[in-house]
Amino acid sequence: MARKTLCAIVGISLYNTSPNNGGTTGVGKSQLSIDLATALNGQIINGDSMQIYRTANVLTNKVTKSEMCGIKHHLLDFLDPSETYDVYNFEKAAVERVPQRKFPE
């Protein structure tokens, strides 16, 4: 039987109904992912290309430790801005962090 993985990717905000602000900074994507992770007993893999950098906290409206509500976050705040990082490295790191679970057919 093939393995299935449950994964939620939050790319738009359900908290802001304006069609012009779906994915912009500060519209609620992080809070939505925290709410989903809390409800599903899950973890979060950051997909924001700027939030990987350690010093981009204000610029990217990066979630704080207290806002994380104890939810484990991956690929967040780990890279020096002078280092390069590409989609290949992101994909490899993200796949390594997705738990392999078997779900019923």
Image: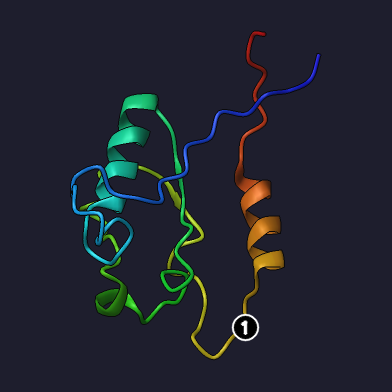
- Helix, strand or loop under label 1: loop
Q: Relative to 8, say whether 94 is above or below.
A: below
Q: Residue at x 44, y 40 (%)?
A: 43
Q: Is residue 38 left or right of residue 54?
A: left
Q: Amino acid at mark 1?
A: Thr
Residue 91 position in % (x across, y down): 67, 57
Q: Is residue 92 left or right of residue 74?
A: right
Given residues 50 and 98, the one toward you in this image is 50
Given residues 10 and 35, the one toward you in this image is 10
Q: Is residue 42 left or right of residue 86?
A: left
Residue 14 position in % (x across, y down): 25, 42
Asked whether residue 49 appears in the rendered view, the answer is yes
Q: Quadrant of the N terminus?
A: top right
Q: Residue at x 62, y 83 (%)?
A: 84
Residue carrying label 1: 84
Structure colour scheme: rainbow
**The quadrant where residue 72 appears:** top left
Q: Relative to 10, say whether 4 is above or below.
A: above
Q: Residue at x 64, y 24 (%)?
A: 101
